[in-house]
Image (tube, rainbow, N blue to C red):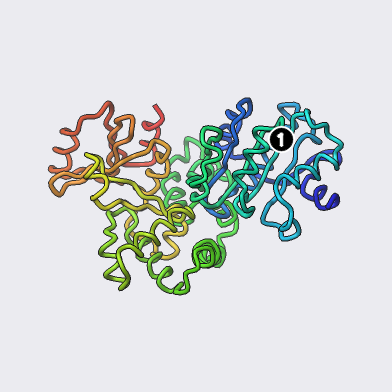
Amino acid sequence: MKELLYRYNPWWEGDYSIGEMIERRSALASLKTTFRSKHVVFLTGLRRVGKSTLLKLYIKRLISEDGVAPKNIFYISLDDYLIAKKSVIELVEEYRKAQMIKFEEKVYLFFDEVAYKEDYEQQLKNLYDNQNVKIYASSSSASVLRSKKRFLTGRNVVVELLPLDFEEYLLFKQIEISRRDAHLLGGYFEKYLITGGLPEYVLNENHEYIKELVDDIVQKDISSFHNIRNTSVLRDLFLLLMERAGKEVSVNKLARILKISPDSAARYVRMFTDTYLIHTIQRHGTTNEKILSPRKIYSSDLGIRTLFTGFRDKGSLFENYVFLKIKHLNPYYVYQNGIEIDFLTEEKVLIEVKYNSNLTDKQQALFNKVKAKRKIIVRKIDDLRLLQK
């Protein structure tokens, strides 16, 4: 066991190098803001979006910038079959023994894929309540954050890691665009719309990588976890959802197409949401309108969407990209008398996405009518800067 712990924690033995990993500054900054709080930090997001890498980059920063002693940092991936019989608390005890750390001494604990451990939430609460610890835990399932046990209510914060945005994509591809070459920006952005933002796929562009990722999620995270035997229905549903990304999706219509019950269709859609393959937003309006109206759906990654549906409808892909940029603002869509405006955020910012095009007269009328603190029309990549003001 001691040797295994050392393999997971190379910083215990001298200089810590994690190779050529490219920093994601905004995501690291989000983790940085949690440094002085007591809260358990849950890092969530799609499989292979880079959660493990981000945790290791943050560990490096703790050592190099925050002065945390390497021996006071413990990282373990809880999906390792070699520790299947060990509880979270037992693993922490093994760590303290290996590094001869006193019980009252503060330690930083990093649990990757925490949901693989049964009763993980109660064990994290035990550590939180009884030991001098700062806990970071990752998971590829949003369902762990809605646990009915609620042991960590009021004791946790959530940081969601999204795929690379366009600026990060350029950084990963080592592409620098000077002002005099600004005309190249549009071409590179359309290439990004095709490739998306999964780090390894951005670097290698191997189509099999994306297919295997989706297959892993369907087979392991959905079918096996929920004991669903008919995986072909899940695959057909996934393709339907990708085809309808950026549009309102009726659960009843999906059920009719797939010849399953509406309850099953709704449950399967939630499973895709829980594994971060898709995101959904509600209609703005009364409680009844929010509940009864169909949700709009967006793909979690543009590369996944274009691989399964082809590169078409750039306007819809651009809208999907804008959604990912403003997801943290909790947007709704606006719908009145058959006319739709793309987004209205909780802070009352109204956003319509028109990729190199204009609003129709009816859209313009609704855009003018809706009450909002700010109104933005996003027609090109440069317009996204308006969202940051």
Q: Quadrant of residue 80?
A: bottom right
Q: Residue 192 or 326: which is nearer the viewer?
A: 326
Q: Residue 79 or 66: which is nearer the viewer?
A: 79
Give the labeled residue for mark 1: 108
- The residue lying at 75 percent from left, 47 percent from top is 91
- The residue lying at 69 percent from left, 32 percent from top is 130
Above or below, comparing residue 256 to residue 386 in the picture = below
Q: Position of residue 317 (x, y in %)?
A: 36, 52
Please tell me how many numbered marks the rendered image carries: 1
- The residue lying at 59 percent from left, 44 percent from top is 121
> Is 94 placed left or right of 248 in the picture?
right
Q: Quadrant of residue 360?
A: top left
Q: Position of residue 6 (x, y in %)?
A: 82, 47
Q: Residue 257 or 20: which is nearer the viewer?
A: 257
- The residue lying at 61 percent from left, 50 percent from top is 119
Q: What secondary structure is found at the residue carrying circle 1?
A: strand
